[in-house]
Amino acid sequence: MTTNKQHTKYIFITGGVVSSLGKGIIAASLGALLEKRGLKVALSKADPYINVDPGTMSPFQHGEVFVTDDGAETDLDMGHYERFTRANFTRKNSFSSGQIYDEVLSKERKGDYLGATVQVVPHITEQIKSKIFQASQDVDVSIIEIGGTVGDIESLPYLETIRQMRYELGPQNVLCIHLTLVPYIAAVKELKTKPTQHSVKELRSIGIQPDILVCRAEREIPLEIREKIALFCNVPKGHVFEACDLASIYEMPLILHKQGLDQKAVEFLNIWTRKPELHDWKEIVERLQKPKDRVKIAIVGKYTGVVDSYKSVEEALIHGGIKNNLAVEISYIDAETLKSSNLNELLAPYGGVIVPGGFGERGVEGKLLAIQYVRENKIPFLGICLGLQLACIEFARNILHLENANSLEFSKSSPYEIITIMSSQKEVINKGGTMRLGAYHCRIQPGTKAFAAYSQENISERHRHRYEFNNQFRDSFEANGMVFSGISPDEQLIEILELKDHPWFIACQFHPELKSKPIDPHPLFSELVSAAYQQKNLNGTI
Ligand code: GLN
């Protein structure tokens, strides 16, 4: 078993009262602050559900699936961890109860526990520890966010593991931060502390005394209320922090730093560090708060009713805005509502359009109409994954006049199978974890718009798809104005394409949004935002 490296310190983040309080943002912000103090930090997410990973869950259920370089399909909080820090994490940083049980059961079948009755304590808890240690190799501080809410049946084994780790490694090596809600009751004009008290009581009944409380609230929590919370929850007075609603999540590291959260964390863990250098976070917040202008971008998708379905795309657009000093106003358009008759009315207000990734046929015809509209009206466009595949189908149908051209995903009998399946995918039976996943290299053609964006020939980007462009159609596409500006090193797979006769029409088979950070915005998003802004200025409609 992998064991704890003595110098690694652990910070556990749990949540209470209700879900969706933003544990991921708190974990990511603390990670950012500790990194800026010169510490090497890992961030991991432990999810209490039974799915082995979220790869097979619908975005309607679970929001976006975030893919790491090594091809793990993970929780969208991993996206926050990567965006807030310099790190790129791996499959070791994301695990679920399903995965833990799967591993324990296969050990049991192998006979590893021969003679023993396999139980939640100690076998499941030991496996959780081993996962935590694996995710914490060679780092100074390992931050682990526990999914779900304290009080859920599912999260009990994780909480028991925290209790044991604290017991085994000592409190100076294990810090427990609990995020709770302090609701404002308008009728009595009061902030209420009782839910926090109950949530901490629940934690303490499992043997965990939180060291620090972060209280989510609509409005500032006065000192006397924070002191009351401290007294009732048995934490020192200065250990109750507030996390009020913010205009941007990227303000959170500075807000927490101002209250001294990172200082308290290092003091508690007995780590000596320099003060954090937060110059670039200040610059990011400054640009977000005082943009020189604004630009409107539409995302034409299928999962538009679910807030987190396109989380990374949304964040990458904000980063593109930061780079250009522009506020990006993002609107979602449900592809199923698009018709030839309302296209102009619905899409004309936007400087740029994105067709993001997706699965299944619903909304495809609407997305094709949107792509035709932006192609013909010279509106800047970025197609991502399914967006590239549909840009190819639209081109085949409307430029090459290949009637009923389609993707094998949507039609088994199309006369022109523009998007097809790779031979390696033909044998796949299990749906989980079997797509083309993770980082692949791509070579960019000099002299193209893609090259102008990246300014380099060799790039690596993350994938999550089963289907690919059908090479039989390469020549006819190229002869009619399509440029394949990014190709896999073995020249077999189309990775980026663009239109010659268009101000900015680019589509990529990978997901560029997964690698964008506010500190290092992804070039395709920066260029889309810039092109969208220029285009609107040209049209004089901004
Ligand atoms: N459904 C398409 C495929 O599997 C596209 C996937 C995506 O957009 N992520 O190839």
Image: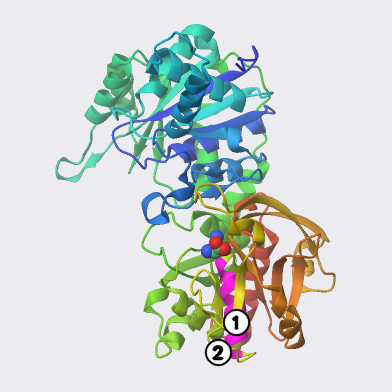
State the predominant SS element of the stretch in magenta: helix
Amino acid type at circle 1 is: Tyr
SS under mark 1: loop
Q: How crowded is mark 1: few (under 14 residues within 10 Å), some or many (20 or more)?
A: many
Magenta span: 386-398
Would residue 539 be found to the left or right of residue 160 on screen?
Answer: right
Where's residue 70, x and y in %? 65, 43
What residue is shown with label 1?
416
Residue toward you, 536 or 87:
87
Residue toward you, 105 or 312:
105
Where's residue 67, x and y in %? 58, 48
Q: Residue, x 49% and y 16% (percent of image)?
A: 126
Q: How many numbered marks appear?
A: 2
Q: How far apart are marks 2 and 1 (CA)?
A: 8 Å
What label sits on residue 403 in the rendered view? Answer: 2
SS under mark 2: loop
Where's residue 202, x and y in %? 28, 21
**Quarter holding residue 195:** top left
- In the picture, the quarter occupied by the N terminus is top right
Q: Residue, x 61% and y 24% (percent of image)?
A: 134
Kindly tell me whether residue 215 is visible in this rendering: yes
Where's residue 229, x and y in %? 30, 23
Q: Residue, x 76% and y 71% (percent of image)?
A: 485
Which mark is first along the chain, 1 or 2?
A: 2
Circle 2/circle 1 CB separation < 8 Å? yes
Kindly tell me whether residue 500 is visible in this rendering: no
Q: In which quarter of the image is ligand 1?
A: bottom right
